[in-house]
Structures are given as structure tokens and as C-alpha cells.
Image (spheres, rainbow, N blue to C red):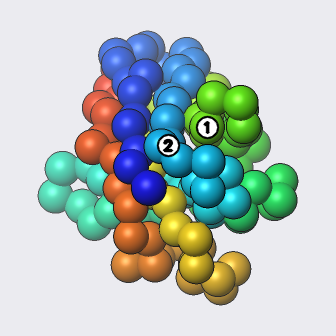
Amino acid sequence: VQLQASGGGLVQAGGSLRLACAASGRASRTYTVAWFRQAPGKEREFVGSDFRNYGRTSFADSVKGRFTLSRDNAKNTVYLQMNSLKPEDTAVYYCAASATVIASALTSPAAYNSWGQGTQVTVSS
């Protein structure tokens, strides 16, 4: 499956952004889709995932309660709604997908074989 991420930008602390990850192919509706982020000099880290379109979402502790995930199956698009943004949320955000990732591996970048190109999110203080 091919992924196209969009929606990044510059926002002040406390603001909101919504990222979109558009997937190609009808089979992608059953894929697990996840978001990761990578700040300069840091490793890529898990942000959140929607497990196989079952509505089972999970999030990193650092974003829990502020970020949500949703899917529009008609558009084959997964959205990451980011509220109450903090400067430490600044990073390049990537969406990833996998048809085979298991629940215990959701937070591992190596478990995903399809990646979008990344979109920059910058939160100013």
C-alpha cells in the first residue's frame, strides 16, 4: 500500500493540527495504520495506532488525552487530530501501515512495511 501524509505546519503552543494519511488500494482498509514522529537527533518514536480498522486505538503516554485517531473508509484516509500541542511535539510525523503487525509490536517501526513521506509539525512556545 502507498501512503501520502499531509497536514503539517507551524502552530503556537496550545493549538491544534490535523494530519491526514491517505492510502491507496481498497485492501488498505484492513491495515493497521500508525503514526510515528522523529525530532532532530532523536529516534523515531511511536505516537498512535489504529489496529486493523477495528477501532482499537492506542497512544503513547506523551500524547494520550491530546491526540486522537479516526478513519474515513470512503476516502481511505486516517486522521491524527492533535490538540493542546506543546513545543516538545515538534517533529517530522510519519504514517505507516501494515497488514500483518501484531498487537504486541504496534509501537515498533520495524513492524511496518509501508511508510508515508513525512510531514513537519512545528510548535512554537
Ranked by sequence position, the earlier of labels 2 and 1 is 2
Circle on res. 76: 1
Circle on res. 21: none
Work out whether residue 17 or residue 26 is closer to the camera in this orientation and state it.
Answer: 26
Residue at 49% across, 36% down: 22
Bin the neighbour count of mark 1 within 10 Å (Cα to Cα): few under 14, some 14-19, many 20 and up. Answer: some
Identify the element where label 1 is drawn: loop
Which amino acid type is shown beneath numbered disc 2?
Ala
Whether 94 is drawn above or below 106: the answer is above
Whether 38 is drawn above or below 118: the answer is below
Residue 121 lies left or right of residue 65; in this view the side is left
Residue at 35% across, 56% down: 115
Asked if residue 8 can be seen in this view, the reply is yes
Circle on res. 23: 2
Residue 40 lies left or right of residue 52; in this view the side is left
Identify the element where label 2 is drawn: strand
Residue at 58% across, 79% down: 100
Which amino acid type is shown beneath numbered disc 1?
Asn
Residue 45 in the image, given as x and y percentages of width and height? 41, 63
Q: Do the residues labelled 2 and 1 touch (CB within 8 Å)?
A: yes
Quarter assignment of residue 61 = bottom right
